[in-house]
Image (spheres, rainbow, N blue to C red):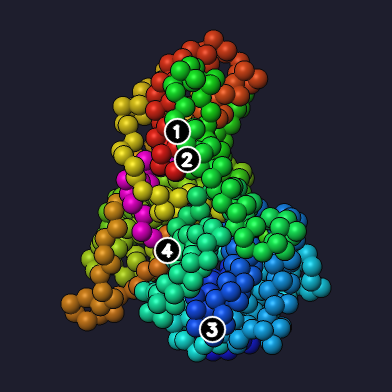
Amino acid sequence: MVEFKNREAVEAWLANRPQGVAVVLAARAALRVLPALALSTNTNRNIRDDAFLILRASVVSWLAAKFSTYDTELLRAAAYAASNAAMAAADDAATAATVSNASKDAAAFAAAAFAADTFAAGASVAPTSAATAYTAASIFGTAQEVAAFAADGTAIDGGASPAALAGLPLWPQDTPKWVTKAWADLKRRLLDAGDDWDVWTDWYEARLAGKRPWRRSLEIARATLPDELWEQGPKAVNAEIKRLITAEKAKAAAKRQAPRKDVRSIGDLEPLDIPSPVPFKWQDGVIALGGSALPVLGPRSDQRDLARKMQACREIAKDISAKIAKRRYNCRIEYREHLEGYLQWFPEDDDGNIYLADRHARAVRELLVAELDELPLPFVADMKGFLEQHIGIRPHFPELLEFFESVRTHALPAPLPQDAVDQVRRAIAEATPEVFAPNVGQALDVEGGPPSTVEQPSAAGESGISKIELPPDPIQGLNPESEKAGAIARTLNFLLKVYKQGAEFSKNLEAWEKFGVRVFPYMYIVIQWLQAFLGY
């Protein structure tokens, strides 16, 4: 459990971690204290002006943490400008109360933590900015704020990526009563002013609840509005954001309501631009399993260190599987089957699939949770080491964490039409090997995920003998049905995207066209379901 007793402890903890960690901790700290503006003695107008500056700085720092792959100079420039604007306002002590200054400082330094690499002189700026945001955020002396900041650090140490942490509710436990009351007051003051403040109150309440953004493109557009527009104040900025939201909703509605007569063939059916848990590619004239690219390392990551971590995952899994085969442990054969599945799909030399490997690792943990009191301690100890090693490499695969977040934050609108899925599977089998490599059908078996979560037994059995505690899994709260349906639909969506490139790559165009005619009505159903699932 991470503990932060003071600013120096925060800086020391952040010193050897990627910049993204400092950014996400600072952004979340700033967002938690936004409601404190309602405690200010300022006039309603000044409070709204302060909220405007804080939200501007907060949205860009939060966005930088949530969508870490979108790392452009445009976004950094927006962070730099937002940070400067908030700092300048906080420095004007004659017109701002202490509580307002603290809130603006927290937001300003959160944005500065992201802008640091481009606009600051040294690599230490990001940790320093995050520590300053922490200090400003905790100026009210609330134990909940300090505990929440420490809980974020604990989640990072437990294997959560900055992007995954950014998507969680702001408060790890119940929202403090003072926040609930202050936010209700601040929200009322903002909305009473008119000027489309709902574009911000809705956004903030989504952050409080840990809801997934409706559109990444919309969030980026919000954060990177021109400086000239921000300088015109809340009325102009909020009106532009409202226009962007309205346009996006109209576009999504048009897609949903488009009559089927406009989509007459597989060529008219457009796949969604979303990640897939199972990638594909054209290889030697047929569609084959695309592999899973090895992790993309940040500027402070060590390639050799990551390679050793991944090697440890493989070797530990091999060792435990071999021991089970030699009957060294009294345990289910399913443990070995999942470990072998893990080894089959674990990425190596740009091959494998991290989603399918992770599915097996989570299945192992669920089995352990259900049987912890009955299993031999040496076996549990070995499995604990394996799980710790695997959880430690997850942050290097942001596509995995992004997929699971979408499962966690989207409700299942209706069951995925299984008949349509089965028809596509049969068509793929019929078109193998003319259009598909044999491993495509195998990779599509994404339904057999881990069993539903079982409450973990206490750490001590009836005999009072201490039990080994399994490492907490940062990927929690997944709906098994949503995960299964989302994985299948996303996989078929990506398969459609690759299939449509066939006119250029296929060696058997007749078989390729025949498959398209065969699956069109069923792929149409799957894509429509996926659009509803994701809120398109």
Q: Quadrant of residue 46?
A: bottom right
What's drawn in magenta, residue-wise? 476-490
How far, Cα to Cα, is label 2 from label 3?
40 Å
Ranked by sequence position, the earlier of labels 2 and 4 is: 4
Q: Residue 221 magenta-drawn? A: no
Q: Which residue is mark 2?
A: 536
For residue 418, side relative to residue 150 (left or right): left
Mark 4 residue element: helix
| In the foreground, 493 or 260 | 260
Mark 2 residue element: loop
Ranked by sequence position, the earlier of labels 2 and 3 is: 3
How far, Cα to Cα, is label 1 from label 3?
45 Å
- Check contact, mark 1 vs mark 2: CB within 8 A: yes
Q: Position of residue 407 (x, y in %)?
A: 41, 50
10 Å crowding of disc 1: few (<14), some (14-19), many (20+):
some
Q: Which residue is mark 4?
A: 209
Callout in the foreground (1, 3): 3
Callout in the foreground (4, 1): 1
The residue shown at (50%, 79%) is: 38
Ranked by sequence position, the earlier of labels 3 and 4 is: 3
- Work out which residue is located at the far top of the displayed protein and give it: 510
Q: Which residue is mark 1?
A: 256
How far, Cα to Cα, is label 2 from label 4?
21 Å
Amino acid beneath label 3: Ser
Callout in the foreground (2, 3): 3
Mark 1 residue element: helix
Mark 3 residue element: loop
Q: Which residue is mark 3?
A: 40
